[in-house]
Amino acid sequence: MIESFRVIDVNSTPRVALIGCGRWGRNIARVLSELGALRLVVDPAADKIEGYVSGLRAEVTADINAAFVSSIDGIAIAAPAIDHYALAKRALENGKAVFVEKPLALHLDEASELQMIAEEANLPLVVGHLLQYHPAFEKLKQVIASDEVGEVRHISSNRLNPGAIRTEENALWSMAPHDFSMVLGIAGSEPVSVEALAVRVVNPQIPDQFSVQLRFSEQLTAQVNVSWLSPFKEHKLTVLGTKGAVVFEDTHSERDRKLVIYRDYVAHGDNGPSFVKGPGEPVEWPPLEPLQQEMSAFLSCIKSGTAVPTGPAEAIPVLRLLHRASAAAGL
């Protein structure tokens, strides 16, 4: 669902404070600086990142209160997930537009409360489901909508990374929100059934790998696999339809093979159906940075009320699916 907001009265580029400047927060800081919006970075380790932030022409502080002053129009939150709800709530209650990295909150009631506060204040609340802003994924959705692969029957998504083992969250919560966001966006509804298998290798308390099976109808199913212990890196989304398939492989080394369509891969002969091998056709997509597209969308909805694809109405079903998959895995 696309959501639009009231226009916040700013006559120039919105002024944004970033809370959290860790591994991913630094990327957000860089892009906001490139867009001319970054004014302040708040991080407990302000002294350690001061050199990096000063190069972005922004102030840095460990004082969280500095983010809520009247001169700031919007707040981007890249803090640990456990802090998302409290920080987003405080920002909204102080009249700030909010961008918050996934997940929106840890609990559904908290996410619903944030949605209610944002709606009542008519403030933007944007969630960091980055791949919704990836031009290759946007093009993939156009391919599906144009009926080039026919009716979608199955969606498969693999997000496999060697490393980045976390201790504060499991692989499902760390990695699957991206895939759930894409799958739900393609399916257009929430699944009627969810099955999940959790695999523990390193820490018996924190699963390192998940396989999630989703059924949306008798005609549409999906599978999502995530792991941070894979010996190789793979981010691949495959959509199978009645006329063909389209594959978005973000980790492919060749740009023109990141998005490929396979047409008429089944031949129907006298001896029954058979698979038709082929190299597939590359699909062109704009060479735009997804994070820049995401941050630009956030700034646009602050300045002019432009609609965004990842508001609470999109993010809450993703959060609900995370909880359903966790429960299905016995967590």
Image (cartoon, rainbow, N blue to C red):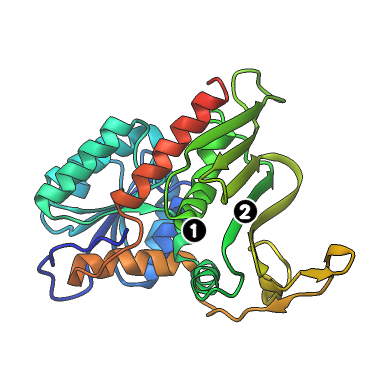
Identity of the residue furthest to the front in this view: 270
Mark 2: amino acid: His
- Left or right? Give the position of 185 relative to 111: right
**Picture mark count:** 2
Q: Which residue is mark 1?
A: 186
Label 2: element kind: strand
- Left or right? Give the position of 298 relative to 200: left
Residue at 54% across / 50% down in the picture? 179
Residue 288 in view (yes/no): yes
Q: Which residue is mark 2?
A: 154
Residue at 73% across / 73% down in the picture? 264
Mark 1: amino acid: Ile
Label 1: element kind: helix
Whole-angstrom CA distance, mark 2 to mark 1, is 10 Å
- Left or right? Give the position of 127 relative to 139: left
Quarter of the view holding residue 84 = top left
